[in-house]
Image: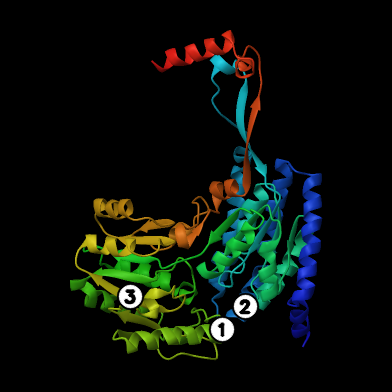
Amino acid sequence: MAFIEREALVFSDEVAIAELQKVFALQKKAFLANTSPTLNERLALLQALADMMLNYRIRIQEAVASDFGSHPAQFSDLVECLGVAGRAKFVAERLAEWVKPHAREVDPALFGNARAYVQQQPKGVVGNMVPWNFPFDIGIGPVVEMLAAGNRVIVKPSDLTPACSELTLEMIRATFDQDQVAAVAGGIELAKHFPTLEWDHLMYTGSTEVGRLVAVAAAQNLTPVTLELGGKCPALVAEDGINYATIEQIIGCKTIKNGQMCVTVDYVLIPEAHRDHLVDLLRQRLESTVPDYAKHKDVTGIINERHMDRLQRYLDDASEKGATLLSIGGESDRATRRMPLTLVLDPSDDMEVMRNEIFGPILPIKTYRTLDEAIDYINAHDRPLGIYVFTETPSSAQQILDRTVSGGACVNAAAMHAALPSLPFGGIGKSGTGRHHGLEGFLEFSNPRAVFERGNEDLIAAMYAPYGELADAVISGALESDH
């Protein structure tokens, strides 16, 4: 009963909106009082964030398992906890170099001994709208680069993960002053209100449909946005890429969060003649590594009943439209919201599984006759968040990378580009805009302020009226240098 009362308090939109407005004003005021926090101040915040993730490690495991019905504790450790702490450590070790002014060239003939440089300046107050699938990895992870850039941050957890949302509020309140980092949880009205504030930068992770609404709301204040919107990430398996290592990557990636991951393998493109062999290898791999899949302890539950029904509707639609379904791993378990992995063979583009990002344990297998045909198929659809190429021929891999466009890509791996703190992460087109992670994340949440410091012995006066001999001399010198 105590949890229900706390949940009702946290998710009261009227209370949440009032709290948001209060901490937003508080952070705006605090930022103006310290618009350029020192390196040591930023490093202290990063250390506090890393310590927070480690101190709440067991609580994070419990909260994620509570919201998903079933969730492997080790995966929570690897991604939701240690991954975020490691991200903070990675940035902290490099931040002293990143915050340095970067000198730019100056023409001494015109500007004498002036200096020019780019100063990475904090933007101000940044908002982070968090999805339900990775409550801490995406809820707290980007806060690393936001703080490293010198900003103040307000996090809005998803209302679909109440246990994780409540823990996020508790963790942040216990670790940070409200005028530095805060969290506000609520329902749909808070979600609608959040992007309407005059943020200095806003990040949203979720569906393309909602991302469009967030972008429109943010545009009213000309707020810059980072949108991570997912998409249908293909695994393109070349003729020489059908082997056990490929199968391990495809099945392994698909079992992460039970397919509830924006960079999971959404569908497979395989040479027509090798489809049945690939299907046999996929089935054998899953049955040998994760037997009785729908009941296995290391399989994550679907987030709620509505999403289970959505996934079943996709399967029914594919079956009715002529696809062959191969279910691996038993029957669906409504109690823990786990489903078997289902291969959808030879899907057509009018099926729900090919029209929508699946976000669950369904894997369409689509065939092609030539590599050009497979590349053309990818290019005929929205640009994905990731493309995964499997081949033993480097020139084939390079050809695919050169002729396609995506947010990220992997060769002989799946989704690993999103796991490295050194690589920028984000989409392009309908899969998103902007980047977080690493240096690019630091730059994303910074203002690249151009600074010019006048020196001596320059000819700047040539630019001012009235124009005469000095201007003519500068023009003549420029014309001579061009020839």
* Residue indicated by mark 3: 349
The residues tagged by marks 3 and 1 sit, at their Cα atoms, a distance apart of 27 Å
Q: Residue at x 43, y 74 (%)?
A: 356
Crowding near pointer 3: few (<14 within 10 Å), some, many (20+)? few
Q: Residue at x 36, y 78 (%)?
A: 286
In primary-sequence order, the first of circles 3 and 1 is 1
Residue that extends furthest to the front in the rendered view of this protein: 466
Q: Nearer the viewer, residue 449 or 214?
A: 214
Dots 2, 1 in contact, CB < 8 A = yes
Counting from the top left corner in percent of width and height, residue 35 is at 75, 43
Task: Say which element carries label 2.
Answer: loop
**Amino acid type for the residue under numbered disc 1:** Asn
Q: Nearer the viewer, residue 251 or 374?
A: 374
Look at the image and tell me in which quarter the C terminus lies: top left
Counting from the top left corner in percent of width and height, residue 180 is at 76, 55
* Residue indicated by mark 1: 304
Which of pointers 3 and 1 indicates the residue nearer the eye? 3
Which of pointers 3 and 2 indicates the residue nearer the eye? 3
In this orientation, does residue 177 appear? no
* Residue indicated by mark 2: 160
Crowding near pointer 1: few (<14 within 10 Å), some, many (20+)? some
Residue 47 appears left or right of 261: right
* Picture quadrant of residue 71: bottom right
**Amino acid type for the residue under numbered disc 2:** Leu
Residue 306 appears left or right of 461: left
Task: Say which element carries label 1.
Answer: loop
Q: Is residue 98 above or below residue 9?
A: above
In primary-sequence order, the first of circles 2 and 1 is 2
The residues tagged by marks 2 and 1 sit, at their Cα atoms, a distance apart of 8 Å
